[in-house]
Amino acid sequence: MSNKSYQMPIQSLHFENSWRRRRSVRPRASEPPLRAELFGVEQLARHAAALAAKHEIATTPGSNRLLARLAHNEEVLRAFNHATLGVDESRRVTPAAEWLLDNFYLIEEQIQMARRHLPREYSRELPRLTSGPSAGLLRVYDIVLELISHVDAEIDAESLTAFVAAYQTASALKLGELWAIPIMLRLGLIENLQRVATGLTKARHDRNLANVWVDRLQAMAEKNPSHLVIVVADMARADLPLSSSFVAEFCQRLSHLNPVLHLARGWLEQRLAEQGLSIEQLVHQESQSQASDQVSVSHSIASLR
């Protein structure tokens, strides 16, 4: 998102050890990417007006939480970039992760630009929200998060202008808020990339864990196939993350190995069936998730340019 794109105001706009170690550092649940129902311009306008009617504004200034959030996002994205660079060549890297890796220089530039253009005292003067998921955050920041969510981070001048104009039919924005929209968009897009990166980190952890178990199964199949049931029993006792990433990687690896390992697949099918799930469902879900992440990352990066 270049400064030329949006001119404000808007009007001019070892196995056990390895497994335990991996398990102990499994990423925590995170906020999902900014990804909601896709809206056209007219739907965006209606949503903006409804959002304005719902917003409640604080009457006193608050602390600047956006700079702290930016620092957190920068830390997460740098850690993700470092970890991706260290991925073994024999392991797959998802398309979204490749996008983040290839464009990390741009992301770093945008983070530094955002920090320069967000003076602590300036943002303290902008209206902030008192309720809802964004309570305590700037109203204008919540507005851009909503826009990003409903266009999947594909920002253009038409949708931006229509969204802000429709919001103002119900609640006027201050001049300072209008001028802050470009920097808020930058912060929101960086936030979105961080959320995707956090999800990708968890997915990579689950794929790595799947590979640890497949490696153990393969080693036992080569050493003493009659003891495979012991490994499967260990799997049944383990607190495995039966996520789409784990299941897809586990089954993909098994499909290329000794058929005797299908004992493990049978156990997995049974465990999933107990939860009303199937391998096919989760493999499809993982494929969709990777495609969605790639789109969100590519849109976010394009909008940052």
Image (cartoon, helix red, strand yellow):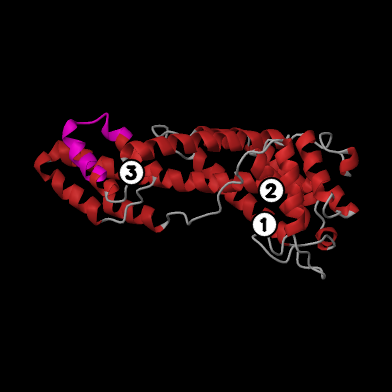
Three-letter amino acid code of the residue under disc 3: Ala
Q: Position of residue 155 (x, y in %)?
A: 72, 36
Residue 255 within the segment the image draws in magenta? yes
Residue 204 shown left or right of residue 102 in the figure = left
- The residue identified by callout 1 is 69
The answer to which quarter of the image holds residue 129 is bottom right
In this orientation, which residue lies closer to the viewer: 199 or 171?
171
Residue 146: give its label. Answer: 2
Three-letter amino acid code of the residue under disc 2: Glu
Residue 57: give its label. Answer: none
- Using the numbered discs, state the Cα–Cα distance from disc 3 to disc 1 in whole angstroms: 32 Å
Helix, strand or loop at mark 1: helix
Of the 4 image quadrants, the one containing the N terminus is top right
The residue positioned 26% from the left and 49% from the top of the image is 271
Three-letter amino acid code of the residue under disc 1: Arg
Residue 186 shown left or right of residue 238 in the figure = right
Q: Position of residue 145 (x, y in %)?
A: 69, 49
In this orientation, which residue lies closer to the viewer: 289 or 52?
52
Residue 210: give its label. Answer: 3
- Using the numbered discs, state the Cα–Cα distance from disc 2 to disc 1 in whole angstroms: 17 Å
